[in-house]
Image (cartoon, helix red, strand yellow):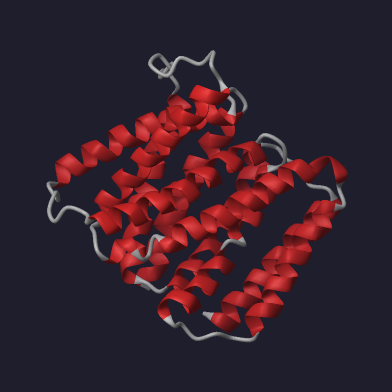
Amino acid sequence: MQAFWFSLLVNSAFFIADIFIKLGSRELSAGRLVYIRSLFSVLLAGIWLLASGNFYPLPSVTVTLQLIGCSILCAIGLFTYVKALQQIHFVNVSVIGISGALIHYVLGILLFDEKANPWFYLAAVICISGIVIQWRKGNQRQGLIYAVISAITWGFGYALLSVPLQNTNAIWGTWIMEFCILILSAVFLFFADRKFNLFKPGLLKLNLFLVALFTILGSYLINICYQQFSLNILGFMQLAFFPYSLFAGYFIFKEKLSKIEWQGNLMIVAGLVLYFFTCT
């Protein structure tokens, strides 16, 4: 029951953040959005860290390096997520992202000796088939590539967080990750967008402040989850995002999915349902 409530809180926080990411993606490039969002995130995480008073023990060098590695993967995931949102429907990106739960299962077996289940392989094939079906819609291919890259990098980035978070508190992990993403986005913009002023980015953007606010909340909660629950359970929690994405796509963004998109999305969800009921 505790996992259920954590699932509801985590998915609600990230869902609200994703809505504002989608809204922000209409106005800004992916690089600028990630950079401005990360400025707010570092500030909010820093305030939270100072208010908590949980400064000790400091993360070890090994833990810090592990967090940096996870941050690199998550930064790539965030950037490609925004790029995908700019090209294909919110629902499609979300559903493909949920399939990253399969990565949690694989890493649970490799890192923590969790039990393997043959049903997992069938579920994975069904999910991949759902993505391939959508590939038939030619004008979506680049967006689908971004969505798949985002699902893979976020899947590995967040699942691997379970390793360093066994040895540091959640708020330290959150702050270090957000700071690394900020540095990475600044380096990217320095080389890719010379016209953008890193010191005067234009922070009067309520959308991106709200992205940062709900991202910090979701990140803090999910970091606690990695300290308390198995990777299989955390994968299961991601399925709750599907009804959220349908609601947002239909009522907020007024998206109309084609027959191919419905077929692909439902096949991915079918594979995930099979996975959750047979492997968790």
Q: Residue at x 29, y 52 (%)?
A: 64
The front one of 192 and 179 is 192
x, y percent for residue 88: 72, 41
Q: Residue at x 81, y 54 (%)?
A: 134
Q: Is residue 273 above or below residue 74?
A: below
Answer with left or right where residue 237 lies relative to residue 275.
left
Q: Is residue 136 above or below residue 199?
A: below
Answer with left or right where residue 263 lies relative to residue 113.
right
Answer with left or right where residue 225 lies relative to residue 72.
left
Q: Residue at x 32, y 70 (%)?
A: 228
Q: Residue at x 14, y 51 (%)?
A: 54
* Residue 256 in view of the camera: no
The front one of 107 and 92 is 107
Q: Quadrant of the N terminus?
A: bottom left
x, y percent for residue 170: 27, 55
Answer with left or right where residue 65 lies relative to residue 268.
left
x, y percent for residue 8: 43, 59
Q: Toward which corner of the image does residue 44 lie, by quadrant?
A: top left
Q: Is residue 98 above or below residue 55?
A: below
Q: Is residue 113 above or below residue 215?
A: below
